[in-house]
């Protein structure tokens, strides 16, 4: 076989595989969004039910601010990015969710602290001493501004962003966390990676805000990179405030899904900066390294938690397979391939996607199961709860659809030409 013909055949196989996955992802995204639109909307009070059983039945009407903000963001993002989701129903539901957040999310207005849990009609139940409710509130408000043009939403987003940055970098007292003498001075990777995501969110197509947050974005990147420890051989979830490894279980803790999610946040930053050296470092340390350590060689799928020294983690769920790390891995590997062209990353995307679609997808009722045991059997049949809502699955599917579409547009189509001609055997023989 001639070299030209082999190249042509390989390109055809690549195009066909990508096209097949693009179609699978598109169809699955439609089914997932339909599930949430049918079952999660609270027509009486606004906002969304997220505690949904396998068939979509509401089993608890508590409303979690993380998930309210995430669903508003997701609906707006779909409306803005994908033409087939540009429906009045989707936008009206997003606005109803946003107005619910504006009315009830903050526990003591004009203070910025948001609740973690609200009753169905908006009364606060619980507050976390973290920044994450406020982060998802910010994302929701910024996307609402982008699709509606209403300045009040952007005002909320920018003001909350300023408060979050202050809590993280200057004065955390507003979070309500007491300083206890025995508590280690530690930093979770979740904090700078979430801030970096907000920098990307607010700075999208906004040169002024992108400039305002440029230094904050660089700070977040440096803080995340400090979590690469053990001479570059491990990504640890927690480090000291000085960027050193911590003693005990806290210091040895690994979260492969978080490392992969941080990886694609960092990849987007590297692309914005035009920094190929950072991109290569991120691919090696935040994509390949956590995947190699985190993939279960016996049953497939990513472990939820690991101990860097191979000791038994203390978390009871450490060996379970959860929906969101696999969603993040699909995004990370496809983005890594899109940016680098390394076929090994595309093959890892296919490997993770095959496992994820086969194990998590529910062909009968729609959406994905969230919690599997180590062997990949469904441990909980719920489709939503305090932490699983309309976010990781549709975000993954929407981003993968866009990336696969862009990749296919760069490849010659099936009608762009015939395979290279091969000379007859009599002419080719010596």
Image (cartoon, rainbow, N blue to C red):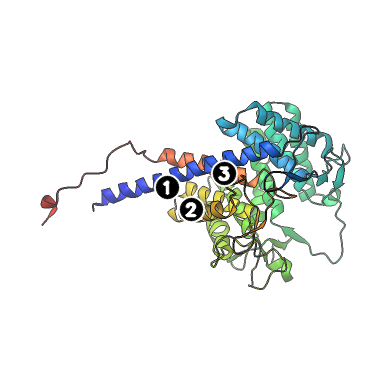
Q: Is disc 2 in contact with disc 3, using a CB cutoff of under 8 Å?
A: no
Please state which of residues 117 and 238 is positioned toward the viewer in this rendering.
117
- The residue beneath circle 2 is 350
Question: x and y percent of residue 416 in the render?
Answer: 32, 36
Question: x and y percent of residue 192 in the render?
Answer: 69, 51
**Mark earlier in primary sequence (2, 3):** 2
Question: x and y percent of residue 29 in the render?
Answer: 57, 41
| Mark number displayed over residue 397 | 3
Res. 92 visible in picture: yes
For this view, does 352 lie left or right of residue 180?
A: left
Say above or below: 167 vs 207: below
**Mark earlier in primary sequence (1, 2):** 1
- The residue beneath circle 1 is 17
Secondary element at tag 1: helix
- In space, the residues marked 1 and 3 are separated at their CA atoms by 16 Å
Q: Is disc 1 in contact with disc 2, using a CB cutoff of under 8 Å?
A: yes
């Amino acid at each position: 076989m001639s070299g030209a013909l082999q190249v042509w055949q390989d390109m055809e196989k690549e195009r066909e595989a990508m096209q097949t996955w693009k179609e699978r992802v598109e169809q699955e995204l439609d089914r997932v969004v339909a599930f949430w639109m049918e079952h999660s909307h609270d027509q009486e009070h606004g906002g969304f039910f997220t505690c949904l059983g396998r068939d979509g039945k509401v089993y608890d009407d508590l409303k979690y601010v993380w998930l309210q903000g995430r669903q508003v963001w997701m609906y707006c993002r779909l409306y803005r990015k994908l033409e087939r989701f540009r429906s009045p129903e989707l936008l009206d539901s997003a606005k109803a969710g946003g107005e619910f957040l504006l009315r009830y999310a903050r526990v003591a207005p004009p203070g910025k602290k948001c609740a973690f849990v609200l009753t169905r009609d908006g009364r606060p139940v619980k507050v976390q001493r973290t920044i994450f409710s406020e982060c998802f509130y910010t994302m929701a408000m910024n996307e609402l501004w982008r699709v509606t043009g209403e300045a009040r939403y952007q005002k909320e987003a920018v003001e909350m962003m300023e408060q979050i940055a202050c809590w993280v970098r200057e004065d955390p007292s507003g979070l309500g966390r007491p300083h206890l003498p025995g508590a280690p001075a530690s930093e979770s990777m979740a904090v700078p990676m979430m801030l970096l995501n907000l920098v990307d969110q607010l700075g999208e197509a906004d040169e002024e805000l992108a400039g305002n947050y440029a230094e904050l974005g660089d700070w977040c990147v440096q803080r995340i990179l400090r979590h690469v420890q053990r001479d570059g051989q491990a990504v640890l979830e927690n480090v000291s405030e000085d960027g050193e490894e911590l003693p005990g279980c806290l210091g040895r803790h690994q979260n492969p899904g978080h490392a992969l999610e941080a990886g694609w946040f960092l990849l987007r930053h590297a692309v914005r900066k035009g920094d190929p050296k950072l991109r290569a470092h991120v691919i090696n340390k935040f994509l390949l390294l956590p995947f190699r350590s985190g993939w279960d060689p016996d049953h497939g799928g990513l472990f939820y938690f690991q101990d860097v020294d191979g000791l038994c983690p203390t978390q009871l769920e450490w060996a379970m397979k959860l929906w969101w790390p696999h969603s993040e891995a699909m995004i990370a590997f496809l983005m890594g391939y899109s940016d680098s062209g390394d076929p090994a990353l595309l093959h890892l995307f296919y490997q993770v996607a095959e496992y994820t679609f086969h194990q998590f997808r529910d062909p009968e009722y729609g959406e994905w199961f969230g919690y599997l045991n180590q062997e990949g059997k469904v441990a909980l049949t719920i489709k939503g709860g305090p932490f699983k809502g309309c976010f990781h699955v549709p975000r993954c599917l929407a981003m993968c659809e866009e990336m696969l579409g862009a990749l296919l547009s760069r490849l010659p189509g099936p009608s762009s030409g015939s395979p290279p001609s091969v000379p007859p055997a009599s002419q080719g023989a010596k």
